[in-house]
Image: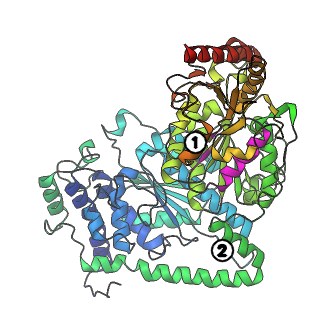
Amino acid sequence: MIPATKTTLNPAQLDQLAINTIRFLSVDAVQKADSGHPGLPLGAAPMAYVLWTRFLRHNPINPQWSNRDRFVLSAGHGSMLLYSLLHVTGYDLPLEQIKQFRQWGSMTPGHPERGLTPGVETTTGPLGQGFGNGVGIAISEAHLAARYNRPGFDIVDHFTYGLVSDGDLMEGVSSEAASLAGQLELGKLIYLFDNNHVTLSAGTNISCNEDHAKRFEAYGWHTQSVEDGNDVEAIDLALRAARSETRRPSLILVRTHLGFGSPDKQDTFEAHGSPLGVEEVKLTKQNLGWPVEPLFDIPPEALAHFREAVPRGKQAESEWRDRFARYATVHPDLAREFEERMRGELPPDWDADIPVFPADPKGEKTRVASGKVMNAIAPRLPSLMGGSADLDPSTYTALKGAGDFESSDRASGDTQGSAGGGWGYAGSNLHFGIREHGMGSILNGMAVYGGIIPYGATFLLFSDYMRPPIRLAAIMEQQVIYVFTHDSIGLGEDGTTHQPVEQLANLRAVPQLIVIRPCDANETAYAWRVAIETRDRPVALILTRQDVPTLDRSRYGAAAGLKQGAYILAEAANGRPEIILIATGSEVGLIVEAQRELEKQNIQTRLVSMPSWELFEAQAEEYRRSVLPPSIRARLAVEAGATQGWHRYVGDLGDVIGLDHFGASAPGPVLMREYGFTVENVCKRALALLEKKNA
């Protein structure tokens, strides 16, 4: 606790002292690291100061208080501004960590990282992603408020704020997210735009002269302009007006000056991504009336002023906890469910209704089976929430009877093509529109908020649009579920442009992402179990457009083997296999048929279903060696996608039937035949391997 400090400064002087404190705390850290972005903290400090000292409701002692206001620094390159604010307002971020900015093992990395630094809500840096995260956070707040608030008990009631940059607004993902936010009328979402007219390499006039205010008005946003980024009272008034606008998200365009105060670098790109330099730091301090020494100077009056956030935060949380205790008395079931969700707990019977699919040679599409499983889970798992990029009829991801998430004054009750109108923000089905990139970043915001297990669906090919947020979900170790359908050239007539080839390899290359390609309906059911129970990383489910056989599990290995990533689907008749056939997804049915043909030739064959490399690699070595014994060197993998990566499992003497070229426009069965995904070709390649082995 910082002791009370008497000051002779008037309010305006104290404001200026506090603003310069976070300016030069940031500048000194960047200069010491000889790396970073000093321009944004110098220019944006006044608006950040006003927000954090006059509006932001948070508790530095408990950064995880569920009803705190959220702050997203989408302009993550300005991370030192956020770290400075966290330190001076009392978060567990010591000054020594400020001095270790961008150094090995520090809590102050080059861009904000969730889970590393107390008070950082989401990992930002790739521009536009934080913008989309904030929209997801605001969606979560609106949804949980609609589900759990009752008259006299607003237990979910806070704002989502963000600081965004020119780069954030230029990246296309922000357009997607902003458009949806306007459509959804997310009135408790407020962004401050650091409108400094400078990018990393030049002034914005060389690349972007659009009218941002008119653009966002067209999206349905409330916009205001503050002409002087140092005018704290004008910023204060703008934030008050934004908070009183309940039907539209707000963008406040604040005209700032990048590198404000730097005699030689203000308003130039040189202040963006490089330290000012020792001499320029001195000149800037002198220009703004700040002592050159000591470095990392925090005047007692400024620190005491900032640390008022601690008792304010404690009081705000205490009042909320009292309100929640009364709420729990009146609405005990709702209170219990809310607390379980915010703790990330699953109901004990959440999977009780997952179907077991009977054996069927014709089978069904795994995307259809997935939809059945989702709708069996959803009634027992209220935290499941998401949607698709305008593809519900194809991805089968609509939750029946769970309602559409939409603004109450737009909830028409028209359910055509949807899961049910009239629910308002209480609905669990999100209609993202044709906005895969925005969908991915919004899902991340929902995940970091807590209380929601978010999912998003599209065709596997269009996972390419979502690669940046998928990567960030993996970095943050957040539970996001991706449902990617139409998983191969089996898609058929849509042709080369829509047939995924390299996407599986791309997704498998992402650290921390679990990729699962189930072979039939029952593996699909277990894939959903894994996705729901995996709390610390994202999961991608890869599903077929076409029907695949539902295997007779009395003859083949139990589908629960999916949880190990790979398992013995069928052993050789004599228990001593000469060759192992490995496949995923729709190609598992192919190797099942091939085994029958090889048996007719007395070829002893083991079948391995391998739906997930990542789950398999997580198993003990003993288990992995039992499935793929080193002694059996003849191995053939079959997958309708790029062969990249498969040689780790088939070895130097193995072979892969895959697809290292693009497809063509023709019916799916024709393409499978023409590209060698036939029983005849599998047997031919298997026999060739055995000949090579025995040569």
- Crowd around label 1: few <14 · some 14–19 · many ≥20 (10 Å): some
Magenta segment, which residues?
Answer: 516-539
Describe residue 107's horizontal placement relative to residue 268 as left or right: right
Q: What is the secondary structure assignment of the residue under circle 1?
A: helix
Picture coordinates of residue 47 (x, y %)? 39, 62
What residue is shown with label 1? 624
Describe residue 592's horizontal placement relative to residue 38 as left or right: right
Occupied quadrant, residue 209:
top left
The reply to whether callout 2 and callout 1 are in contact (CB within 8 Å) is: no
Given residues 255 and 443, the one toward you in this image is: 443
Describe residue 237's horizontal placement relative to residue 360 as left or right: left
- Lower position in the chain sequence, tag 2 or tag 1: 2
Q: Is residue 525 magenta?
A: yes
Between marks 2 and 1 in the image, the one whose residue lies nearer the viewer: 1
Given residues 540 and 581, the one toward you in this image is: 581
User: CA gap, disc 2 to disc 1?
Assistant: 49 Å
Please tell me how many numbered marks the rendered image carries: 2
Answer above or below: position of 600 versus 336. Answer: above
Q: What is the secondary structure assignment of the residue under circle 2?
A: loop
Q: Residue at x 65, y 59 (%)?
A: 452
**Which amino acid, by three-letter code, is at mark 1?**
Arg
Is residue 387 at all visible to an observer of this figure? no
Picture coordinates of residue 14 (x, y %)? 30, 76
Given residues 637 and 432, the one toward you in this image is: 637
Is residue 485 at all visible to an observer of this figure? yes
Describe residue 142's horizontal placement relative to residue 308 as left or right: right
**Which amino acid, by three-letter code, is at mark 2?**
Ile
Picture coordinates of residue 69 (x, y %)? 53, 68
Q: Is residue 127 magenta?
A: no
What residue is shown with label 2? 155
Occupied quadrant, residue 515:
top right
